[in-house]
């Protein structure tokens, strides 16, 4: 997927987009539409009340980034192992990989979070904290999708490359580590970037069990300030900035790895 405002030729579009959104918000703060008077002062850094509210909301940034990044790293490890199982010559190993993917891909993430947090203690007596519950569910759920990305990347590598490596005396694991996997990562990097964006957005579901990420903090502030429009608009801006930064980072990695903006050169 190519984001026009993040390409090399359209690099100027990202600041212009953010400036346009900020201008729109500034216009809303001046006037009132449909009889509604905007109250952006509750998020203004110029007074102590606004500073406290901003600090409260922005702390959710680090919670969202930490749980999403850890979940993505765990998902990459599990997904790669499951993908390797999926291309195994042993039928039972391949079937186990398929069962794992289909099972966890079929369960909605919210349902999984609720079952692990509320159902698992009743069944086993094991109670996970909100962070660990969210981390486990995000990682396992996403690993089912990540494994398919890796599997498609592994199957895109020509068989002759592995045969050539073995003819040079390389062991199977060495061949996979030095010859196959670097090409796989290069091929699937854009898709993995999209998965990280997906995990960042899906982390908002962990708020239902009390995890203090972006969405949870916005909900709590709404209950005290009674200004849902302003607070949730700011929440949208937080996610927008976060996702755009991630997308920009993925594009930088693609260029450094020799990938063109619209695909491989």
Image: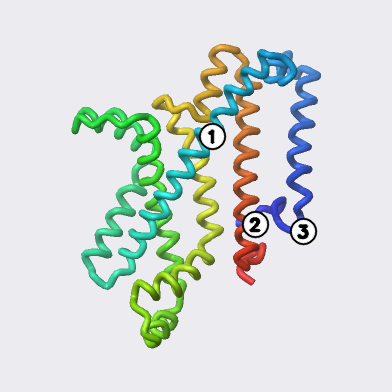
Q: Are marks 3 and 2 in contact (CB under 8 Å)?
A: no
Viewer-side label of 3, 2: 2
Task: Give the quarter of the image for residue 109.
Answer: top left
Which quarter of the figure is the C terminus placed in?
bottom right
Task: Give the SS element for disc 1.
Answer: helix
- Is 227 drawn above or below residue 64 in the view shown? above
Looking at marks 3 and 2 on the same chain, the residue that comes earlier in the sequence is marked by 3
Give the distance between the C-alpha atoms of the residues marked 3 and 2, in whole angstroms.
Answer: 14 Å
Asked which colour scheme the image uses, the reply is rainbow
Q: Residue at x 45, y 78 (%)?
A: 158
Q: Secondary structure at mark 3?
A: loop
Image coordinates of residue 205 in percent, x first then y, are 45, 33
The residue depicted at 62 percent of the width and 17 percent of the height is 52
Q: Secondary structure at mark 2?
A: helix
State left or right for residue 51 relative to residue 67. right
From the image, tell me which residue sits under label 3.
9
Question: What is the number of the mark on residue 62?
Answer: 1
Residue 93, image quadrant:
bottom left
Q: Name the mark nearer the viewer: 3 or 1.
A: 1
Between the C-alphas of marks 2 and 1, the distance is 22 Å
Residue occupied by mark 2: 252
Q: Is residue 145 left or right of residue 27?
A: left
């Amino acid at each position: 997927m190519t984001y026009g405002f993040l390409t090399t030729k359209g690099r100027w579009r990202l600041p212009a987009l953010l400036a346009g959104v900020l201008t729109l918000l500034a216009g809303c703060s001046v006037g009132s539409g449909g009889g509604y008077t905007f109250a952006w002062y509750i998020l203004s850094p110029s007074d102590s009340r606004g500073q406290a509210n901003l600090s409260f909301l922005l702390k959710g940034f680090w919670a969202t980034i930490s749980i999403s990044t850890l979940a993505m790293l765990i998902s990459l490890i599990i997904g790669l192992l499951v993908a390797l199982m999926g291309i195994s010559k042993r039928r039972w190993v391949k079937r186990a990989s398929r069962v794992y993917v289909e099972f966890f891909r079929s369960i909605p993430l919210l349902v999984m979070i609720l079952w692990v947090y509320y159902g698992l203690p009743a069944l086993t007596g094991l109670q996970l904290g909100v962070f660990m519950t969210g981390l486990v569910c995000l990682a396992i759920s996403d690993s089912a999708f990540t494994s398919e990305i890796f599997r498609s990347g592994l199957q895109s590598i020509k068989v002759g490359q592995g045969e050539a490596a073995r003819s040079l005396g390389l062991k199977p694991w060495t061949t996979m580590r030095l010859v196959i996997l670097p090409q796989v990562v290069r091929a699937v990097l854009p898709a993995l970037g999209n998965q990280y964006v997906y995990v960042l957005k899906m982390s908002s579901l962990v708020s239902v069990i009390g995890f203090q990420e972006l969405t949870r903090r916005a909900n709590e502030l709404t209950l005290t300030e009674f200004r849902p429009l302003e607070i949730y608009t700011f929440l949208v801006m937080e996610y927008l900035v976060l996702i755009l930064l991630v997308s920009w980072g993925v594009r930088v990695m693609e260029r450094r790895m020799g990938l063109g903006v619209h695909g491989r050169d």
